[in-house]
Image (spheres, rainbow, N blue to C red):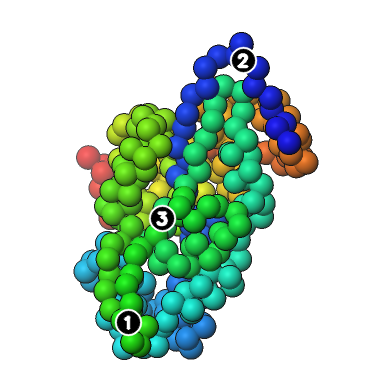
Amino acid sequence: MQRTPKSPTSHPTARYLVASDFDQTLSFNDSGRVLADIVGIGNFDEKVKGLASTHLVQQGAELTYLLRHDPDFRSVRPEHLVEAGKRVRLKNDVPLLARMLREGVEGASFQFIVISAAPLEVVQSALEGIVPAENVLGTQLSYDGLSNEISRVERVSAGYGKIVVLEEQELRFETSPDHTIYIGDGSSDLYVMHHVNSRDGLTIAVSESKDIGRIAKRTVLSDNATSVLAPIMEDVLQWDAHQIRALYDSHGLSVQGWDKVRTDWLSFHHAAAPEDALAA
Ligand SMILES: [Mg+2]
């Protein structure tokens, strides 16, 4: 049912591309760790941390490197990736977020895509029935015809790779860069957020990470995936809180708490000899 009918006499509809990260943006936990658990790898976090500290691969591409080059991951087959997707715990109301974006609102329509550094199979499996497979973009692997072992990394959508994918999608949907909205939580999103900001798009962080918080134009924290609609409606459509609450209400969600807090991060250290400075 169309809850926000558009009359033919209304303003022309502006089209927006809403691109979201997956791990810890639409999900609570990291799909790489879920995959590691499935194949019995206990020290996944240390492996990722160690690899990240070498800066050998782009931020967010650590799992892909491990899948291709770490002997512990040689047993991974496509069915494990699909299984990992099914086990990842999604944030609340991801299907509702997809539906609200699909329905659009008076004056705006939204194309919702997911761009993840995780293997495509994992994210498509996790979002099956929620986001059409062609709107889920992830790291592309290919497999040995006989053993089904991962034999090649075709393309990684992490770091700068996310920008490449995003630009392809802007062409596909014929949306202008200043009508791009990017949502992410972490380090694999930094490059793409800088890129979106530089072309007057909107960037939304969904974590308290300092790195991303100082780049993203807005930050929203919630266990409900539809929370990102609040900054979208405010910044893009200039809606007020009353209109935004009404939108949630019309989809059966009532906003219980909405604290607008601008966070300043401060840290201090004492100068070596403050008394000398005072005496000067
Ligand atoms: Mg993420």
Secondary structure found at label 1: loop
Instruction: Tell which circle, 3 or 2, labels the residue nearer the N-terminal end.
Output: 2
Residue assigned mark 2: 8
Residue assigned mark 1: 145
- Which residue occupies 28% across, 54% down? 161
Instruction: Tell which circle, 3 or 1, labels the residue nearer the N-terminal end.
Output: 3
Q: Quadrant of residue 90?
A: bottom right
Q: Nearer the viewer, residue 61 or 108?
A: 108
- State the separation of the CA atoms marked 1 and 2: 54 Å
Asked if ligand 1 lies within 8 A of label 2, the reply is no
Which residue type carries mark 1?
Answer: Gly
- State the separation of the CA atoms marked 3 and 1: 23 Å
**Mark drawn on residue 237:** none
Which residue type carries mark 2?
Answer: Pro
Whether pointer 3 and pointer 1 mark residues with C-beta atoms closer than 8 Å, the reply is no
Image quarter where the C terminus lies is top left
Task: Please state if 85 lies on the left or on the right of 96 as rendered.
Answer: left
- Which residue occupies 32% across, 82% down? 145
Q: Nearer the viewer, residue 53 or 8?
A: 8
Point out residue 260 in the picture as x, y percentages from the top left corner. 60, 36
- State the separation of the CA atoms marked 3 and 2: 34 Å
- Which residue occupies 27% across, 66% down? 154
Considering only vertical position in the picture, is 28 above or below 54? above
**Mark in front: 3 vs 2:** 2
Point out residue 82 in the picture as x, y percentages from the top left corner. 51, 73
Residue furthest toward the front? 145
